[in-house]
Amino acid sequence: MKIALINENSQAAKNGIIHDALTTVVEPLGHDVHNYGMYSADDDAQVTYPMVGLLTGILLNSGAADFVVTGCGTGSGSMLAANAMPGVFCGLIVDPTDAFLFAQINDGNAIAMPYAKGFGWAAELNLQDCYRKLFEGESGVGYPKERAAIMKKNRGVLAELKAKTCHDMLTVLKSVDQELLKSAIAGEKFADLFYANSKDDAINDYLRSL
């Protein structure tokens, strides 16, 4: 699995802590982490939480990433922005129980975490425990197990509902503020990471045209 990490500007200084916690857990499981930054608060490309939503939509809809790990001060802004995109199902994860239940019940493709609120002593251990609950087992199994079938059905209903209420990602990219979009993809390593992994030629061509 290709797991993309995105940090917005208010919590950019914690990118190293988050990246280390994520790679410590998921790389031994055979997953790859692609760090899209921000890498520090002083990065030239400043990513706001609305831009996090755009980036999440681009990465998941193009196939450049299979899962996105992001967040902001509370996690709520990044979650809302990500869920505004087609094909994105993002959960707010605060503790390992949230992570386990989101993976088993909702089987989404993105999470947002609070990197300021409650981010105190041993925060990196909480991150690692959350990532373990997300990635160490099979997702979508259901909890409790006897409700697995209805949970799977409801995920399908939600996916169909979102498909009806959202435009496709290319239409979104052409419709949004183009300066906002340019800023969202201006990260230092975006081009190197994205174009090597994206599977959608139409999205690639449009982003390159900017």
Image (spheres, rainbow, N blue to C red):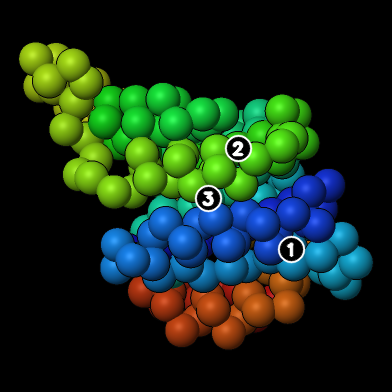
Name the residue carrying label 1.
Answer: 38
> From where the camera sits, is residue 107 visible?
yes
Residue 85 falls left or right of residue 135:
right
Q: Residue 143: which numbered mark, if any?
A: none
What amino acid type should be assigned to the residue bearing mark 2? Met
Q: Is residue 144 above or below residue 138?
A: above
Give the spatial CA distance, label 2 vs label 1. 15 Å
Q: Residue at 42% across / 57% down in the picture? A: 25
Name the residue carrying label 3.
Answer: 69
Q: Quadrant of the N terminus?
A: bottom left
What amino acid type should be assigned to the residue bearing mark 3? Val
> From where the camera sits, is residue 59 visible?
no
Residue 111: x %, y % from top left: 50, 41
Q: Is residue 145 above or below residue 122?
A: above
Q: Residue 113: which numbered mark, if any?
A: 2
Marks 2 and 3 close (CB-CB < 8 Å): yes
Instruction: Report helix, strand or loop for mark 3.
Output: strand
Instruction: Report helix, strand or loop for mark 2.
Output: strand
Give the spatial CA distance, label 1 vs label 3. 13 Å
